[in-house]
Amino acid sequence: MNLPRGALENVAPFVVDPEDTLSEADANGVRTLKGSAVRRLRTDAGDMVVAVVRMHGVGGVLWGHNERISSIWRSTADPSVGQGTERTLAPIRPWKGVVGDGSETCLAALESVVPDRQALMMNAEDAANALMRRDRVRPYDLEEDLVLNGQQEPGMYVPQQVRLAETPENDSDGNPMYPSAYWGWMAVRGNNRTQKRQSIYRLSSGEVLSGVPAEKLGRDGDDVVFDPRVWLPQFSALLNREHAEAEDDPDSANGSRARRAAAIAVVDAHLVIGTPTPQRLFRIVQMNNRRDHVHPPLDFDSTNRSRALGRSVLGMYVAQRVMDEKTAEVLSGLAPVRELPDASPGMTVSELRDLRSMKLLQELFPTDPHKRHLLRRALSENQPSQLKAAEIHQRARTWSALTSESYPKPWNPRVGQVFGTKAREGVVLSGRGLRDLLAVADSDDAAFEELVAYRAVHWLASFGIIEADRGSLDGQEAVGDAGESVRRSRRTVVNCLQALRHEKSRMMAAGLLKALVAAMDDGDRRPWQVGPSGKEMPGREMTALWFDTEFPKETGGKPRRAKAATTAVVPPARTVVPSRTALPMPAPGPTPVTSPVTSPETGLRPDPGVQEAAASEGSGPVARDGADGGIAGPPSPEALVTRLEERIREVHTASGGVEDALAELAALCPGGTAARPLGRERADAAVRLLNQTLSRLRKLPERVEDVAAPA
C-alpha cells in the first residue's frame, strides 16, 4: 500500500465499520488490513492492490475521464486548442510527494490542475450531464432499480487530487475562502451507479468533491462545508431524522429521500490503495474497467468505444516496453502533440495532426511481429495471416477515432474503413513529411497516393465534406448555390477516394488536398473550392455538394487493373459465352496432368496451356534427358526448389487470370439474371473446383515451412 495520507483522510469518513477490515494489534500496537479485505488485480497495463470495504452510499466522485464520455471534451492532443478558450479536460498525471530524504516520489494516486474552482465544478457538471444522456439507451431505469434492489456490484474508486491554478481569495479574517486543492475518490468502475446514488441523496459529485452547501445539511446560512469529516456526519444525521419521520412508501418517487435511499445506505466498494508502478496507475485502472464495457454494447457510442480499444493497445505497448510512456500519452489523446520526440518547433497545425495520425496508423497496423501479437491480445483477433475484414475495419475505426482527437469535432469513425485485407501485413509509409508530400503531389504518383490513401478521408470528414455511408439511405437533400434543393446520391467513402484518384481529376484533387491543409492551418476555417488546375478560389466555400459535383460518383468506380500474363484462356470481350461451352479454368496447383481427360469430380477439362507447361518442365517423377533420350536420374534439390518457385508463380499468375476473366464476364451481364453468360451447371462446377483448389492451397504454406531453413 503506497497511498498519500491526504487520500486516506478523505475516504476514511465514508468507510462503514472500518474495524471489520482490520486485524488485531500486534506487539507494537500496529493493526493491518485483513487478508480478506485486500485483493491484487492484474491488467495488461500493470498490477494494483484494492481494499474491499463497505462505503457510505453518497461516497465517490463522478470521473470526467470516463471513456464513455471522453468525446465531449476538446482533447489536448488537438494542436489548435487555444489557452483558456476551449473546453478541455485537465490532463491526468501521477501524484508526486516528498519523502523523508526530501526527494519526490510517485505514490498510488493521481492529480490534475484546473484553472479555478468554477472550472472544477463545471467539469463535474458537464460529466454528469453527458452520462445522463448516455444512460437513456439503458433498457431500464437504473435509479429506480437501486431504490428497489440496492447496488449489486461494487464500484471501483481511485484517489485523485485536483489542484487550483489560481490562489483562493481571503475572507475578512485573512483566511482562504476555500481550499486550493481537493481530494476525491473517482469512480473508475460504476460512474452511472455513483451518479444515480447521489441523485437519490439529492447531492452531486461536484459537491461531494468540493464541498456541500450548509442548506443541504439542514443548517441556515450560505457557507460551504469542505471537509467530509464535518459535513458527512451532519448529512447522515439529517437523513436519519428524515427516515424516522417519513412514512414507509418506497414506491413513491416523490417520497422521502431517506426511505428511497435505504437500500443504498451502505454499498460495497473497491478502493485502489497501491500499485508497484504508480507512474502507470491511470492506465492500469482504465484497463481494468475497459474490457467490461468495450466488448459488450453497454452505452459506449462508436467513437468512445473505438478510442477505448485504441488506448487498450497503447497501454499494453507501454506495459510490454515496446513504446515509451510519453508517446503513448500523446497517441491516447492525453498530452499535446508537440511533446512527441519527432515534433519540431516550426510544425504547423496540419503537420502536427498528420504526425500523430500516421504514428497511430503504424501502431495499429504494425509490421513488427511482437506488436502484432500484442494487438491480437488487446483486440481478441484471429491469427495475423487469418485476419478478417471485420477485424481490419475495427482497427481502422480505432485509428480514425483516435485521430479525431486532434481535430475540433469527432466524426463517425467508420469513415476510416478504407483498407483491404492486405493491411493485415502492416502499413509501411514513405517517411516523407506532409509538407514534402504536398509539394510534389501534382507529379509524384507515390506521394499523391499516400496522401489520398491515408490522409484525405480524415481531412474531408473533419470539414463535413464526406461522411460514412449510412446503409439503406438512398440520398439526402442539400442546398445548391442558387438556393435550390438538390438530392445527393448515396456513395461510400472508398468511392469518394477513387474519384480523387481519377486520372482526369489529378490536378484538381491535388489542389483540393492543399486547400484542406491551408484551411486547417488558418484556424480550421471553411476550405475554399479549387478549379480544374488545382488553384484555390477564395470566397467560395467547399461543400459536400460541390465535392459530389466535381468528383462525381461515376468516376469513383474501381479502376480495372492491367491484365496479368496468364496461361488461362480468357473469353474475348463483348462475346457472350454459350452456356453449354466449357469454362476455361487454370490448373488448380502443381499436380501434373498427363492427359486431357475430363475430371469426374468437376466436369471441367484441364487447361491445355498449363498441361503443356507442366509436361515441358518434367513434372513427373523422372524426366527425359533431351540430349540422348535416356532416362535421367532423380532431380537435384536445387532443381526441385526452382520447380517449386515456378509452380507457385504459375498459380499466382493463373489466379489473376481467373479474376480478369470474371471481370470481363461481369461486364457482359445485363441488369437482370435472364441472360447471364455462365450457365448454372458450369458455375457450380467452377465453384467446386475453386473450393477444392483453395483447400489444397491452404495446406501448402505449412508444408513450405516444413522444408525451409530455420529463421
Image: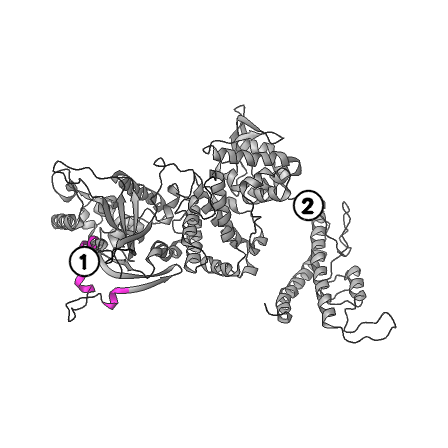
Percent coordinates x, y for residue 695 in the rendering:
64, 64
If the image is split into quadrants, where does the C terminus sit?
A: bottom right
- Report whether 438 appears left or right of 401: right
Q: Is residue 527 above or below residue 62?
A: above
Q: Is residue 591 above or below residue 304?
A: below
| Residue 246 seen by the camera | no
- Whether residue 211 is in magenta: the answer is no
Cβ atoms under marks 2 and 1 closer than 8 Å: no
| Residue 425 seen by the camera | yes
> Camera-side residue: 302 or 692?
302
- Report whether 338 appears left or right of 653: left
If the image is split into quadrants, where does the N terminus sit?
A: bottom left
Percent coordinates x, y for residue 131 in the rendering:
33, 45
Residue ranking furthest to the right: 628
Residue ranking furthest to the front: 101
- Regarding mark 1 in the picture, which secondary structure is present there? strand
- Whether residue 16 is in magenta: the answer is yes
Tell me which numbered mark, 2 or 1, is placed earlier along the sequence.
1
Classed neighbour count for the residue bearing mark 2: other residues with Cα under 10 Å, few (<14), some (14–19), many (≥20): few
Residue hosting label 2: 560
- Report whether 367 appears left or right of 703: left
Residue ranking furthest to the top: 482
Percent coordinates x, y for residue 122 in the rendering:
29, 39
Classed neighbour count for the residue bearing mark 1: other residues with Cα under 10 Å, few (<14), some (14–19), many (≥20): some
> Camera-side residue: 310 or 591?
310
Give the residue type at disc 1.
Answer: Val
Residue hosting label 1: 16
> Camera-side residue: 459 or 60?
459
Bounds of the magenta span? 9-38
